[in-house]
Image: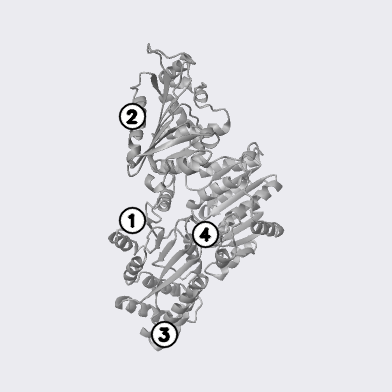
Amino acid sequence: MKTFQELNFKEHYDSQKDNLLNDFYIPALANSKKYRRVVGYFNSKSLASVALGLKDFILNNGRMDLLCGVDLNPADVNMVKFASQHPEEILTSNFLNELDSIEDEIVKNHVKVLGWMIANKLLRVRVAVKINKYGDLAPKGEGILHYKIGLMKDFKGNLISFSGSINETSAAWEKNGEEFHLFRNWKEGELIHLKNNLDTFRDLWNSQSENYKILEIPEAVEKKFIDLAPTNFEDLVFEKKVSKDDASLVKKIELYDYQKEARDKWFNNDKKGIFVMATGTGKTFTALGCLDKLLAQESQLLTVITAPTKHLLPQWENSIKKIGLNFDKIIVATGDTKWRVKLEDSLLDLRLKNINNSIILTTHDTLASNDFIEYLYNNKRGKYLLIGDEMHGLGSPYRKNGLKEELYDFRLGLSATPTRYSDEESEFLFEFFGGELYKITLREAIYEFYNPETGKSYLTPYNYYPYFLTLNEDELAGYKEITLSLFKYQDEEYTRQKENLLFQRAEIIKDAHNKFKVFEEILESIDDYSGLIVYCSPNQIKEVLKILAKHNIVAHKFTMDEKTIPMDIYGGLSEREVILDDFAKENYQVLVAMHCLDEGVDVPSASKAIFMCSSNSSREFIQRIGRVIRRFEGKTHADIYDLIVKPSRDKLDKSLQKFEEAIFEKEKERYKQIGYVAENYDYVIDLLNKNL
């Protein structure tokens, strides 16, 4: 969040020279904690015009007071009084439509926004009606409230006010010829004007004016708004169910040429295959492009989109709505006890041909559950499509249970890193989904593929900084003992004992105590901590947070403990979504991640990462790098800091040195693979050769 002083507002705005929404209103609202407005006319379309700023305003726990003038006759005023006394009877009246000029479905959706804010005590609305010298309501035509004043306060207590010709309507902010003057409390010559505007608002709002009667919006209307409003604000503002009746209202996103090429290859491969595309290159929209074309071909289609975690499902839902798919129904089948009923209802609608298509969003674990599989088998009509996001996560013994060839007629796998630990698991996944069809490597996404809209590569270049350290004496003793035990199994490809010993050895390396000293060295070398993610193990997180606090760095942990379920306390968002939003706004400088932020989660504001621990999986490493090299406004490159425990060959008996080298060979290849793509390639390779 920025202060008003940081936003550098001008003294005067004119729609002939300025974009009133983008230059002033949206950034001002997004960074406000309090907004007071008195206007002659208001309609709820203005809320849609500033949806981006309004969302931030709500997440900032902002409060808005709105006083508007309405051309009411005595009968209208009587309706207000009647509604407050008989709330149940106002629900069928035209009061809301008359007050807000709501005439079509789009405007009704914005009434939901208004109602949601009122219901959640974020917005108070009062109506000012002109009265005559006898204190009676003035007859229609004898004057209305016509002030146009706005006052805003930011989180630091800075105040601004604006006054001029502009009403609180979408036409005023987007279309009309309008102008207004801006006054700031940190500018000495403007303070008196700001104070006058504030006094005018307070007098009107508190019914201290002799010329207007102030009417409260009846509590019953607030309750009606609650009935209309969804509980999730993000869905409320940006959700628009697209059906055959209103698909024309949504502009479809056009695929780029390379995405069309991938789509066409999938159709030419019997609608099966895998897109191996680096993070940030648009594999989600490419997949939805395939679905869009398939929906036009199939009269009855059920699409199941599965992701590794619930946290990724809202991203898919938003993308589906953004691209403008012509679907009949979408449900989320995971996370609550009602998903079985929702799924069964959706399948029944398809079977009875009440709808032609449906989209099911779920997780890999739910996909493999017996209930989910049974519902799909028992109600199958038409064709089924399975889109597997991060499809490498579907290869475990349990999750493979959900991959039924006879159930899914069409299959599409998505991953930047599709191979798994074992060749057998990878072979199964590639065979089920239909093999690799289209590929964009990490290097290509950084240096070769350019976004036609921005003229920049899809991913930002990065510098890679390996830091080398050794085990302490106690760790080394345990390490040597395990290595000696491993030596017995050197000729065996796999045993449970060998796997356990490798895990124990990896844990010693992962939690090496000397990493904390190196971590502090890295922190001291960084000038700006904003946008930093620290990946650590469960055993490291407490000390990492302690070190960050010692350096006065504002951090927040991001683990499996932070909730993914939308909650009223967060305005319908989940705890994780709020944390990521605060991180993007730099309310937190650092996220400390544990078992999270690997796959698919969008954190484009991140620009630096410190790897306190890593597995020997190149896939995990690349997934984590993908979190910090996505394009973001103002970001030109990313920095990756990797803490590497050097092999202890010189501390081992000669008989074990070769064995140790063989085990470490895969690790060394991973470091070189990441270094090869880095901007500082020469420095990295030279450093690796000297130390490894």
Task: Report the amino acid beneath label 1.
Answer: Val
Q: Quadrant of residue 591?
A: bottom left
| Quadrant of the drawing holding the C terminus | bottom left
Tell me the residue that label 2 is attached to: 199
Task: Report the amino acid beneath label 4.
Answer: Tyr
Residue 577 in the image: above or below residue 540? above
Tell me the residue that label 1 is attached to: 554
Pair 1/3: label in front: 1
Q: How many marks?
A: 4
The reply to whether residue 296 is in sight is yes
Label 4 – label 3 distance at C-alpha: 37 Å
Dot 4 or dot 2: first in sequence order is 2
Tell me the residue that label 3 is attached to: 656
Tell me the residue that label 4 is attached to: 398
Residue 412 located left or right of residue 220: right
Looking at the image, the residue that sits furthest to the bottom is: 654
Crowding near the residue tagged with mark 2, few <14, some 14–19, many ≥20 C-alpha atoms within 10 Å: few
Residue 26 located left or right of residue 259: left
